[in-house]
Image (cartoon, helix red, strand yellow):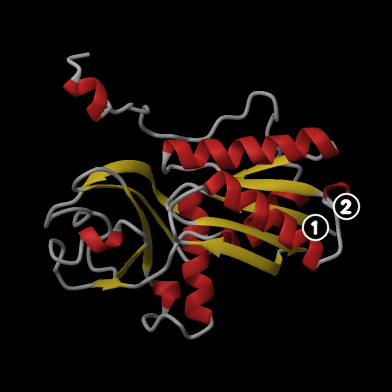
Amino acid sequence: MSLILCIETGTNICSAALSHNGALLSLRESEEGRDHAQKLASFIDELFRENDIDAEELDAVAVGMGPGSYTGLRIGTSVAKGICYGADKPLIGISSLKSLAMAAVEDYNAGIIECGPIEEMLLCPMIDARRMEVYSAIYDSSGDELLPVAARIIDEDALCDFMPGKQMLIFGGGAFKCREVMKRQGLVYASVAPSARGMAALADYKFQNGEFEDVAYFEPFYLKEFVAGVSKKNMLAGK
């Protein structure tokens, strides 16, 4: 038995869900891209009220560990750690790209994505990075990683040497960059957004196998170092 709070904040989407034994119970999310900290706290409160539970009744908290937005990942991790400390619950880290791939499989099984058969396709989730760059990996429909997570430059030849002849399903926030650049045969594009719903089965698997993070030392997988911008006010002041 597992009752797990799932949190995904690594992109402009703020998402929280409750799962029970790997199945989704309730979901809250917003694509507005602002105030993740405030929205996440509100979403979690709504989930608890809707299901008449509190943090003490959870079995674990799962958080999307990236790659993704530095600020977004920090917010999700901080909230998850706070709940784990306060309620004395274990923390589970989930690859944001892998959970995105599992969300795509769910959409295919629900008839939302038309492609396939998906068991014969390569799944390539993409999270938007800077300019013509994405965070990506390749999985099969079971969630096994075939090509590791990396920051990759998108051009017409991107990923063309990986298992040629296989159809590839490309989706996620970074996929829009590829449509006009990667046009070769065998590529199928779908609209699938990062969401806590894709974490449910993965979090349950890790819970059942005791794969927990050290709450004190856990850090998200940023993949890139955070680069702070210079404010226009300071630039004008010559600072």
> Can you say whether 174 is above or below 190 in the image?
above
The kind of residue tagged 1 is Leu
Quarter of the image containing the N terminus? Answer: bottom right
Determine the secondary structure under disc 2: helix
Q: Residue furthest top?
A: 239
Residue 236 position, x and y percent, is: 17, 23
Please give the name of the residue rendered at 13% of the width and 53% of the height, measured from the top-left corner.
155
Choose between 226 and 207: the one closer to the eye. 226
User: Residue at position x 30%, y 45% from top?
Assistant: 129
Assess whether mark 2 and mark 1 are in contact (beta carbons under 8 angstroms): yes
Q: Which residue is mark 1?
A: 3
Which residue is at 34% across, 41% downward?
Answer: 150
Crowd around label 2: few <14 · some 14–19 · many ≥20 (10 Å): few
Q: Residue 109 has which mark?
A: none
Distance Cα–Cα, label 1 vs label 2: 8 Å
Q: Amino acid at mark 2?
A: Glu
Is 75 in front, or is 198?
75
Please provide percent x and percent y for residue 33. Answer: 43, 53
**Helix, strand or loop under label 1:** strand
- The quadrant of the rendering that contains the C terminus is top left
- Indicate the position of residue 13 as horizontal and vertical percent values: 47, 56
- Whether residue 8 appears in this view of the structure is yes
Q: Earlier in the sequence, mark 1 or mark 2?
A: 1
Label 1 packing within 10 angstroms: few (<14), some (14-19), many (20+): many
- Residue occupied by mark 2: 57
Is label 1 or label 2 in front?
Answer: 2
Tell me how many marks there are: 2
Q: Is residue 62 above or below residue 199?
A: above
